[in-house]
Amino acid sequence: MTRRLTYTLIVTLLITAACGESRTSPDQGSSTYRVVATTSLFADLARLALGTAVEIDSIVPAGIDVHTYEPSPSDASTITNADLILMNGLGLDEWVGSLVEATKIDPSDVIHLGEGLDTSYSWTYLMSEEPDAEHGTDPHIWLDPNGAALYLQKIANRVMLDRPNLTLEIKRSLASGLASLQQLDAEVRALYEAIPKEDRKIVTFHDAFGYYARAYDITIVGVAVSSPGQDPSAKEIASLIDAIREAKVTTVFSEVQFPSKILASIAAETGATVLADLYSDALGAAPNDSYLGAMRSNATSIAASMQR
């Protein structure tokens, strides 16, 4: 069964599940403004932007891959009364469209956090080899704390527009959230600057860390798969093994939501160690159940692998 056909069946189920339920929009007297994000990570960024001014929920559970997630009827209930839906866009979580269609949410109530940043926020996009990436654009903007800061600003701006009475509270939360991201960026930058540039090399499971590498002047030697769910060819594996040996990389990284036999095989061939503890699209257990915690964990693990 093709993925498109699977989505068609799911949409049918979602429409049935959502039938009879009604949404409460901001201008209908609701005392609580509800935000639903596609992932736990984006939900946490919303908390950094909005604090406790609104109610925040997420769809994809922590530790689950957002790329290949297929929505369930219960997800329709989650977003039925949402005032705002947060998704990344750029091919990362396009399955949200089936939920929006099923629950008849106004498309204007869906924010594509990763889109439009080039013109509106002076952001420079990177290209990606992932087949699902929209127009070949790398969607993993939030892995650079400066990109995450743009997400916070977009979220806060929209909610303040919808609920002017929350403006002062949100501005305070936003200022605190942006300060936390600035502090995080300074900490991570100092960690890598203590490592010679020639030693700042990394191999990851998939092509998610381009913006992160750009921010901290890290060289990505290679990735194991072009996109989650697609195994590399024997030629691609051989090429990556050669690149690892040439670059003298001693550690290859998987991600918590992507257990990888492929990386284990590559490590066995090269003598490298596999660490399955990077966070990209999903959060994990405490202390990695927040964006700030997960990013600090990433930096600690990656920097340790670069020590000679």
Image (tube, grey):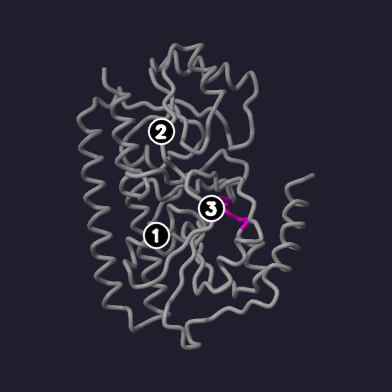
Q: Where does the image place residue 289, in percent across and percent down from the top left?
A: 37, 48
Crowding near the residue tagged with mark 3, few <14, some 14–19, many ≥20 C-alpha atoms within 10 Å? some
Disc nearer the start of the sequence (3/2): 3
Q: Work out how far the residue at label 3 is from the one at label 2, CA to CA, in angstroms.
A: 19 Å
| Residue displayed at 39% across by 43% down | 285
Compared with 235, 165 (above or below) is below
Element type at mark 2: strand
Q: Is residue 156 above or below residue 71?
A: below
The residue at the point 45 percent across, 18 percent down is: 244
Residue 180, given in percent of the width and then of the height, sits at 24, 54
- Determine whether the residue tagged by mark 1 lies in a helix, strand or loop: helix
Callout 2 amino acid? Asp
Circle 2 residue = 277
Report crowding for label 1: few under 14, some 14 to 19, many 20 or more residues within 10 A (C-alpha): many
- Asked if the residues shown at circle 2 and circle 1 are in contact, with their CB atoms under 8 angstroms apart, the answer is no
Residue 4's spot in the image, x, y percent? 74, 51
Q: Which residue is mark 3?
A: 60
Instruction: Judge whether residue 202 is colored magenta.
Output: no
Residue 222 shown left or right of residue 262 in the figure: left
Residue toward you, 199 or 68: 68
State the CA–CA distance, disc 1 to disc 3: 18 Å
Q: Which mark is residue 284?
A: none
Q: Circle 2: is it few (<14), some (14-19), or many (20+) Cα within 10 Å? A: some
The location of residue 216, given as percent across then percent down, is 31, 38
Q: Hey, which quadrant is residue 56 in on the image?
A: bottom left
Q: Residue at x 48, y 27 (%)?
A: 222
Q: Secondary structure at mark 3?
A: strand
Bounds of the magenta segment: 89-95
Residue 151 marker: 1
